[in-house]
Image (tube, rainbow, N blue to C red):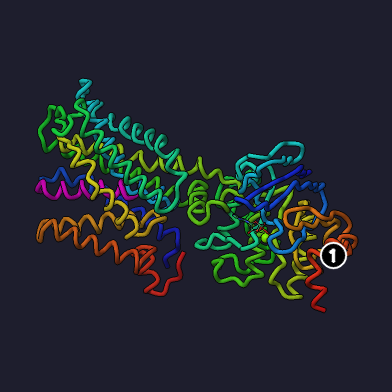
Amino acid sequence: MVTPDSKSRRLVFWVLVLFIALAVFPWLGIPVYFVSLLFTVFLYVILATSWNIIGGFAGYLSFGHVAFFGIGAYTTAMMINGFDLSPLLTIVSSIPAGVVSALIAVIVGYPCLKLRGPYFAVITLCFAFVVDLGVKNLDILGGPEGLWLKSMDLPIDIIRAIFFEVMMLIMIFSIALGIWTSNSKFGAGLRAIKEDEEVAQTIAINAPKLKIEAFALSAFFPGMAGGVYAYYLTYIHTDIVFDMMISILIVLMALFGGGGTWLGPVIGAVVLTLINEGLSTFVRAEFARIVYGCLFIGVIIFMPNGIIEFFKRAKGVPPG
Amino acid sequence: MLKGTNITKCFGGLTALSEVNFEVSQGEIVGLIGPNGSGKTTLFNVISGLHKNDSGEITFEGQRITGLPPHKIARLGIGRTFQIVRPLMDLDLIQNVAIAVLYGREEINTPRLARDRAEEILNFTGLASKADHLPGELALEDRKRLEVARALACRPEIILLDEVFSGLNRKEIEGAIHLTFRIRDEYGVTVFMIEHVMKAIMGTCSRVMALHNGVKIADGDPEDVANNPEVIKAYLGAAYAER
Ligand SMILES: Nc1ncnc2c1ncn2[C@@H]1O[C@H](COP(=O)(O)OP(=O)(O)O)[C@@H](O)[C@H]1O
Ligand SMILES: [Mg+2]
């Protein structure tokens, strides 16, 4: 007989196996392409899971989340080039990148989170454009030329493997944040805000404060991921790290899997990254974008609660 | 306990409340009546901080609350329900109430304990058997009870009930009157209630105020207010004229 306890123990076991398998993956001499692909999957899981805190739980659809990713990338690049960091410090220095992103989220969130619905979506979109333009026009940040990062003094595949592991670690933390949020007082407050912000306030929820905290948290991990991504590429450019397509992908992934649940954005990110990769590699990139556009429309119309909920309902399992 | 002086609130050119004074003392059940559009809900919105009044001052237990954000006012111990019920639609009843427990004045911070407390409150309001339903599955009577349960979950000192009785049938009104007394007697919560149903007012309130076009026209014993000519003219006039 399977008791819930032994069932969850078995689940933990398989999750551990999965993570260990993922961790050894880059050391097995598998072609770089696959390592890179997994690295990208990790990246999008982080982005979608973090976005979910403000967008999925609190219902504030940020369409400018790529800005936090890019800010993290540039923060790290500047630190690397400004200070002579040892390899270990190089890895740790993605933490300040996350902190800078979170701080900027607090500053930007303070006025922006007073807006709701489409107004918030539009203002965050504008925020990302402004940051992109600003960085493009600042010579100290490389301007339109982009920035090269000093590379670590190690063989390239070792460097790749190290940052693969770091990205995976950040992903695990961001998923943990998602799980914690969905079971905590914090997450409950965000859910109330999403449903009805005025009612939330009448039950003593400090909505303005909670929203800013959520926005800052949702910017922190993308900032860190941006830092690691910068190292990984050793070259960054505004067209890469402030690509508006990433902003849209993040929202699509989270909503596709199911916003407001921790698992939804994880599944959404994995599935859509693989589809995107498959389409761009075997068909062509433009085609991938068309498919994405259609997916976006389809998701919003037919599965407003994401695929997990959609399939549960199709199988007759009650929602919840 | 709750006191308002010269409360005025305008919406553009419309004066929804004009120089309204009121006071509710601890342990009272006070009624607020008046025809539709007379400013009753607006008064509750001003008290709970959802609307800012243009002039006047509200104090709660001696402390000035005018201008405080709604969550602080709730935190001080003023709970409310909404006339047009506003449940958190995607969350089941127990979650609706548990969130209020977590953020209210219970000092319960773990979701599991909050659920236990929420269950007790659902039980108190007669919703225990529907704890895992979504609000959309409830009949109007139960939705109104859910409003009450959520407000109580914050453990308020005073609860503002906005037309909890309207739209209910005779038997349901009996139940709601009973619940109102139990809110005060078992939870020790002072009640300030907007009501149209005269039977409910007469059956529960120790004192009644009447508003008409934003002006307070009567305040006192329910019988006296109900027989006050100005009130009859403003509010009951239409009802009596029908007979
Ligand atoms: N948010 C608002 N904006 C503009 N006018 C309002 C608003 N809320 C209420 N009013 C107006 O104020 C008056 C009083 O409304 P209300 O307080 O809801 O009355 P009651 O609850 O006594 O039926 C009405 O004329 C109403 O149209
Ligand atoms: Mg009203």
Report x, y in % for residue A62.
Answer: 36, 48
Q: Secondary structure at mark 1?
A: helix
The secondary structure that most of the magenta stretch takes on is: helix
What's drawn in magenta, residue-wise? A30-49
Report x, y in % for residue B75.
Answer: 64, 43
Res A315 visible: yes
Res A169 visible: no
Q: Quadrant of ligand 1?
A: bottom right
Q: Residue at x 20, y 45 (%)?
A: A24
- The quarter in which the N terminus of chain B is drawn is top right
Q: Residue at x 58, y 60 (%)?
A: B86
Q: Which chain is disc 1 placed on?
A: B
- The quarter in which the C terminus of chain B is drawn is bottom right
Determine which quarter of the picture holds residue A128. top left
Tell me the residue that label 1 is attached to: B202
Q: Residue at x 56, y 71 (%)?
A: B137
Determine which quarter of the picture holds residue B117. bottom right
Q: Amino acid at mark 1?
A: Met
Q: Is residue A37 left or right of residue A57?
A: left
Report x, y in % for residue A313.
Answer: 40, 71
Per the image, is B110 magenta? Answer: no
Name the one closer to the observer, B105 or A184.
Answer: B105
Instruction: Estimate how packed mark 1 is, as few (under 14), some (14 to 19) or many (20 or more) residues with alpha carbons within 10 Å.
Output: some
- CB of mark 1 near ligand 1 (< 8 Å): no
- State how many labels appear: 1
